[in-house]
Image: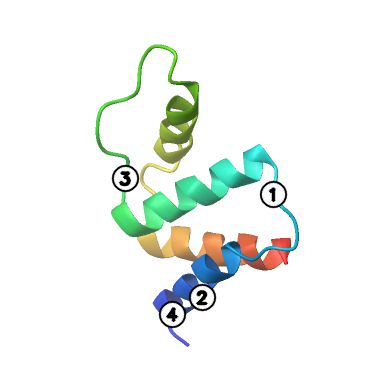
Amino acid sequence: MTLNEQFQKAVNESKNLPEKPSNDILLKLYSLYKQATKGDVSGEKPIGFDFVNLAKYNAWEQLKGKSQEEAMEEYVELIHSLK
């Protein structure tokens, strides 16, 4: 199975985890997914009281420079650790 296939399988499995992950884990999953599918962070940083989107942006921004393949691998490993 290719890395891309493993990643897509993990994305599907993320919707059926035995219990809802903590907010920290959800942010990690979000940022790894975005890095794996879009590359480095893009768009304007949210401002004001948009705390949720600011947290998401910051989490994704912390992965700047990580390759899409590395992000896919980490995403797959994290999903497997949550099962």
29 vs 20, nearest the viewer: 20
Residue pictured at 64% horizontal, 45% vertical:
25
- Looking at the image, tell me whether mark 1 or mark 4 is earlier in sequence order: 4
Q: Are marks 2 and 3 in contact (CB under 8 Å)?
A: no
- Find residue 5 and name its label: 4
Relative to 4, say whether 66 is above or below: above
- Disc 3 and disc 4 in contact, CB within 8 angstroms: no
Mark 2, secondary structure of its residue: helix
68 above or below 52? Answer: below
Residue drawn at the location 46% of the way across and 35% of the way down: 56
Residue bearing the label numbered 2: 9
Q: Which residue is mark 1?
A: 21
Crowding near the residue tagged with mark 4, few <14, some 14–19, many ≥20 C-alpha atoms within 10 Å:
few
Q: For residue 70, what is the image quadrant?
A: bottom left
Label 2–label 4 contact, CB within 8 A: yes
The spot of residue 51 in percent (x, y) is: 49, 21
Q: Position of residue 20 (x, y in %)?
A: 70, 51
Question: In the image, 19: left or right of 8?
Answer: right
